[in-house]
Image: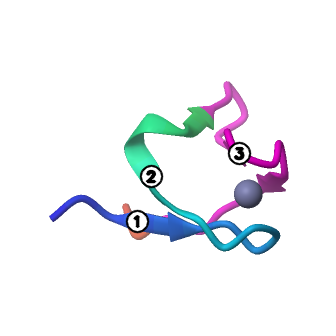
Amino acid sequence: MEPLIICPKCHNKKEIRHLLTAQSNQNIIYECPDCAFILRNIETKKG
Ligand SMILES: [Zn+2]
């Protein structure tokens, strides 16, 4: 299964890998395509 993220604003579920932007400083940003809510510093399980 693809990991899903639930937008805290509009509560739509999206596949995380299509929506995340990894920046050079390793911050990860999720931008919801439905409501344009931006969520920063998402925790990831990778070492
Ligand atoms: Zn949203």
Towards the viewer: 21 or 8: 8
Asked which secondary structure carries label 3, the reply is loop
Q: State if disc 3 and disc 2 touch (CB < 8 Å).
A: no
Q: Position of residue 47 (x, y in %)?
A: 38, 63
Can residue 26 be found in the magenta stretch? yes
- The residue carrying mark 2 is 16
The local crowd at label 2, few if under 14, some if 14 to 19, many if 20 or more residues have their Cα within 10 Å, is some
Towards the viewer: 36 or 45: 36
- What residue is rendered at 15% in x and 65% in y? 1
Give the magenta-colored segment's residue range.
22-44
In the rendered image of this protein, does residue 3 appear above or below residue 33? below
- The residue carrying mark 1 is 4
- The residue carrying mark 3 is 34
Q: Quadrant of ligand 1?
A: bottom right
- What residue is rendered at 43% in x and 36% in y? 18
Tell whether circle 3 marks a residue whose Cβ is less than 8 angstroms from ligand 1.
yes
From the image, give the main secondary structure of the stretch colored magenta: loop
What numbered label is drawn on residue 17?
Answer: none
Can residue 25 be found in the magenta stretch? yes
The residue under label 1 is which amino acid type? Answer: Leu
Q: Position of residue 3 (x, y in %)?
A: 32, 64
The residue under label 2 is which amino acid type? Answer: Ile
